[in-house]
Amino acid sequence: MDKRKKKNTSSDIKVYSLGGLGVVGMNMYVVETNKELLIMDSGILFADDTINGVEYIIPDFSHLVKNEHKIVGCFITHGHEDHIGSLPFLLRQVKIPMIYATGIAVGLIKNKLEEYPDISYNITNFDSDEIFKFKTFSVEFFKTNHSIPDSVGIAIKTRLGYIVNTGDFKFDFTPIGDKPDYYKMTKLGKEGVLCLLADSTNADIPNFSISERKVGESLNNLFGHIEGRIIVATFASNVYRVQQILQASVNSGRKVVVFGHSMEQTIEIATKLKYINIPKGYIYTSRDLRKAKIDISTPDTTILCTGSQGEPMAALSRIASGTHKQIKLLPEDTIIYSSKPIPGNEQFINRNINKLVHAGCHIIKNSLLTDTHTTGHASQEEIRLMLTFMNPKYFMPAHGEYAMLKEHANIAISLGVKEENCFVLEQGDVLAFNDNGARIIKEGVQSGNVYLDSGFAEVNSQTIKERKKMADDGMIYLNFTLNKSKKILANFDIQTAGFIDPDTLNNLFNDIKNKAQDVFMHILTSMKKFNIQTLEKQLINSLNQYIYTRTERKPLLITSINVLN
């Protein structure tokens, strides 16, 4: 696949990802020439429980910081968090001349950035027929279907042809919102697509995904037949789904009470932009319940909430645990999951389901009999359709885990794209085009992950390693006190946490304690020049070897050496 020829690199057109390859989320793709750099999306990834104390992951922006002078703007394909979630962190580090977004994405971005009053930014609300021209390329758009309104693909016209990024897409022939712009897609293919970057999330799923309209029909049917109270959990950002849940509630004569900050914000923004159209007097928030006497225990109630993925602090999780301040489960409640489990979240979802069933609730999930969810991403037949429309010379699957990217490349090859023209890349790899063809530059730009805690503070990699070590093998704390003459002034102290129980393994604990004292004294007396850092390092290395020999575990060793006058 790698074509290595002598070339003038100053004429290269480079395409690469700083996020979105190898993971489902954190999307950020870049097109760069010798004069200009264009960013597409700036997303966030929600961390799983394998990284202790980390809630969010964003791209490393180092390359953008170094090339800030070349940036012409950041173009947004749609308003989901995995495409706009890292914008505040990008804007703090890099001066972006303009954020280009359309429709509801503009409202969601402005709402997000209101929480960061120290950040200044420029944003323009483009029309899908607009064209933006720069020195070395121009940018245009085409409408797509997704689970949020105003989703677009981006087409960048270069001297060698179009570089097209589909964004997240599907083909819904009976959509709730606008139809995809089939004409523009085929027109791009006829004019010449140099390289296609396309959504790979469902590349391993055959056939077509079902229409969002069919989900609405299923929800209407369910709401019309369920007699008791209904609690529905879905993604707040799935605006079309939220609209259909609200409409099904109105059709069945139910008032709707909304719980979850993100859900309330999305409904507020979508209502202002007229993507949600519900008569007044049907929707209440948690604030309304505190102001007025509204009985939410009656059968004519829909509770719409976040927490479809089992997130511990989300509304549904607190309802299931009985810790929600305003909602108490009733034995005949029906819980509808209008979502699909994100890989890795199944155990958290199942934990909540067990609690809900134990409380006497009825559970309805997506199935062949009850269409309570459909994906917003293209399955294999839709992927084939996009590849046929675009007819790209080169293909770079995007947005997905490695197996998804690989399967997407195989589909492209089966449709006639040359195998040597399909590039399954990793973050930081550069796909460079010039008059001689295409080549891969491995690790051509600096990339990586930046880890954030629940307060959006950065967590460095060393801290993550230490947390993992503590979680896996526990910790030992060693405390020594001596004077400058290297004389011990106080009893040596050793404490453990998550390693062994000194009461039940007293002999092992005493052996480790004695070994620590012996090693410390040996190193201390053999040192010609007293140095605390050297002493700590040698002590930890020696004790680590001894503890592993005895226990086959490597606890985190923390030393405190106090030198008194």
Image: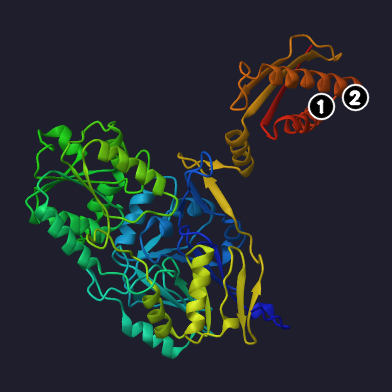
What is the number of the mark on residue 267?
A: none
Most foreground residue, 529 or 311 = 311
Distance from Cα at disc 2 to Cα at disc 1: 8 Å
Residue 182 vertical placement versus 25 (above, below): below
- Report which residue position mark 2 lands on: 527
Q: Residue at x 83, y 19 (%)?
A: 518
Residue at horizontal 20%, vertical 58%? 243
Residue farthest to the left, as pictured? 253
Residue 242 vertical position relative to residue 376 in the rendered view, above or below: above
Element marked by disc 1: helix
In this rendering, is residue 324 above or below 86?
above
Residue 198, quarter of the rendered image: bottom left
> Is 478 displayed left or right of 526 in the figure?
left
Residue 2 place in picture, x, y as percent: 66, 78
| In the foreground, 101 or 144 | 144
For the N terminus, the image quarter is bottom right
Name the residue tied to disc 1.
Answer: 535
* Residue 242 appears left or right of 294: right
Q: Is residue 462 visible?
A: yes
Q: Amino acid at mark 1?
A: Leu
Instruction: Name the spot of residue 124 as percent of width and height, x first.
Output: 36, 64
As helix, strand or loop, the secondary structure at mark 2 comes to loop
The amino acid on which the numbered mark 2 sits, given as a three-letter code, is Met
Q: Nearer the viewer, residue 312 or 236?
A: 312
Q: Residue 420: horizontal and vertical position, in percent? A: 60, 82
Q: How is the image coloured?
A: rainbow
Mark 2 or mark 1: whose residue is earlier in sequence: 2
**Residue under the point 61% across and 60% down:** 63
Q: Are marks 2 and 1 in contact (CB under 8 Å)?
A: yes
Q: Is residue 428 left or right of residue 20?
A: right
Tell me if I can see residue 561 in this picture.
no
